[in-house]
Amino acid sequence: MRNVNMPPQVQADNSVIFRIKAPDAKKVLLAGTWPPSKYDFTIPMERKDSIFEVKIGPLPSAMYEYRYLIDGISTIEPGSNLVTRDGIYVENRLMVPGPQADLYDAKNVPHGQVTSVWYPSPILGSERRMSVYTPPGYEKSNKRYPVLYLLHGAGGDEEVWVNRGRANYIIDNLIAAGKAVPMIVVITNGNPNTPAAPLDRSYNAKVNDNIMGAMSSQKFEESLIKDVIPYIENNYRVIADPDHRAITGYSMGGYQTQNITNSNPDKFKYIGVMSMGLFSSAAPGIKYDKDAHLKQLEALKKNKPGVYWIAIGKGDFLYKSAVKLRALYDEVGLKYTYVETDNRHEWNAWRLYLTEFAPLCFK
Amino acid sequence: MRNVNMPPQVQADNSVIFRIKAPDAKKVLLAGTWPPSKYDFTIPMERKDSIFEVKIGPLPSAMYEYRYLIDGISTIEPGSNLVTRDGIYVENRLMVPGPQADLYDAKNVPHGQVTSVWYPSPILGSERRMSVYTPPGYEKSNKRYPVLYLLHGAGGDEEVWVNRGRANYIIDNLIAAGKAVPMIVVITNGNPNTPAAPLDRSYNAKVNDNIMGAMSSQKFEESLIKDVIPYIENNYRVIADPDHRAITGYSMGGYQTQNITNSNPDKFKYIGVMSMGLFSSAAPGIKYDKDAHLKQLEALKKNKPGVYWIAIGKGDFLYKSAVKLRALYDEVGLKYTYVETDNRHEWNAWRLYLTEFAPLCFK
């Protein structure tokens, strides 16, 4: 039952031939994150003897995820070891060569270290796990470093910005190119109902997957301020002031970034909201107190963030909520930098946004 | 195309019901690592409407890997986030409750940190990646610690002892129970042809998967002595003497453990060979100089290892090679501790062996 591995063949023009051996299958579809495909928009593959095949593209340079749908069963590529996970989405990775893939590549440059750290969270009542990136040279240096707090979306955990997001290689490459200053990157688990990624919880643990409840509790936000930041500032050589703290996140993490900085207007000089807008407009059932929000934004404005960065793709299902968020900020007079891309609500947006946001920090 | 996730249901008696929705499938098989199954010994599942189902066991408490074979295609469980990887084997994890699973569990005990570290390897001509476990309290202590070097099998990399082997949780649990002393565990990439796990190499890198060539070159062994140990001893608070160095590995890593300690009889007081015997008897084509081997073993004997530990399962395809290794050690008079289990050549052996070997070290 060891299946033949037939990795995708990237052609000279960046078109890609996918092949899979499935002699008994009736119908094989391919699903991937390249434009304009979505997971609910699959590409039929053509049978040639026992092989199903399809050629797509040419594709823009980037990192993509893909999987196969064989007679109704979603499956990764048999025999491939290039697999990443975000939540329950375990998928194969495809790199399409060029400048965009190179941003996310494990290149021959100095690499930082990534550590899985358990830290106490009195706010959430358990030990919790996070990933901490320290830049090249950190261990042998006496220097103090600025810190970027990097948050993920619903369904994710403290591994996804590394595993699928390539955050460590993105920062390595930016530092090596002189585009970003050496920084510590703290990647938390933003779901307050669970302390760690799936394999790093006790097998006896009951899992509470109620993400909306988790988001509305704002307990993670409190924990980031009261548990995570003090732990980082007590255990790493950091510059522990607002000018040397940045925070960004996508989707749920963009909402949490807003909550955290709205409630703590004096703590972060660099703020990035990715693929998220005014949450109440995206989640109409949610309680929303506009006056309270305006008051928070006034306080934030008074503290003059060095960078308030909003990035979203034209194809993002939350696009309209970002329009509303910007309208509100315009109303208040809170200055922001707005970046609009062609993306949907997808990893190729978030990897790109990190590549663009990190260089703006600490300068 | 989001498939329904139907995780295995473990019953009160530790029998397990597996179910998978596959309305269009003709034949669905289950493959798992529980006894006596092997991957080439699959269990047919029975169709009930659109669901295929089978009940197995009761199973002994342990951690198992499993996957499905749907109309000839090997696939992981749709929608499951409990997935581990060893080489190209991406599979689901099943914990069957009880004392054995508890040994490998992420329990509510102090956890060490696991760091992905890039280090220079002049011997192999590149930066290489390893995983370093530091025990609970390491960061805040001034203490120096002993070091266990932990090697993997062919096809593996610096991630598998963590991802599939649960080495960090095994050591956490042993330390918490007072069974092992706090130690640093260094998990290397034993394939000299590749610097890192698949996702952590450049996408442009040519991969050389010739494991036999890699094993016979003995370049990794040289690199462990000349690159890895000096890096660890220069960058971590370790006790840098033979009495505080241990080394063990399974399969290819058991062969490398022999090579390393045979060539460096004065460097490690604690030596563990898992699921490996006399390599020349397992790989008959290989060049073998018995006289040279005997000379090395004489030198090792003179250095009196504190523990020389050999563990293998009765069902291991390398069992006979371990018989021959022991006969040779008996001939030389090199003392060893021999542990024989019911296992095959499998992760449930290696996880168990680590649980038994680590407590013997540094005492």
Image (cartoon, coloured by chain):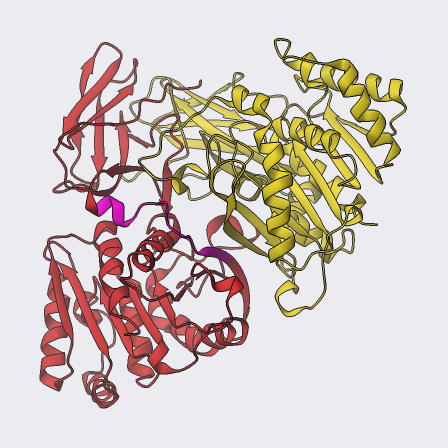
Chain colours: A yellow, B red
- In magenta segment, residue B104: yes
Left or right, B331 with respect to A9, comes to: left
Q: Residue A275: name its quadrant.
A: top right
Q: Quadrant of residue B295?
A: bottom left
Placement of the N terminus of chain A among the 4 image quadrants: top left
User: Which residue lies at the image location 53% right of the left edge and 53% below the top edge?
Assistant: A115
Residue B309 position in % (x across, y down): 20, 71
Quadrant for residue B267, please give it. Answer: bottom left
Instruction: Pick the residue in front: B280 or A281.
Output: A281
Q: Nearer the viewer, residue A25 or A110?
A: A110
Q: Position of residue A53 (x, y in %)?
A: 45, 27
Q: Which residues are magenta?
A: B100-115
> Closer to the camera, A111 or B153?
A111
Q: Residue furthest right?
A: A333
Residue A219 falls left or right of residue A80: right
Image x and y of residue A83, in percent = 46, 40
Let me know if residue A88 is in the magenta part: no
Residue drawn at the location 35% of the way across and 18% of the way down: A71
- Asked whether residue A15 is in view, the answer is no
Q: How many marks?
A: 0
Q: Is residue A194 visible?
A: yes
Residue plotted at (16% across, 76% down): B336
- Which residue shows up at 30% across the image and 84% down it? B265
* B241 to the left or right of A178: left
* Percent x, y of residue B17: 20, 25
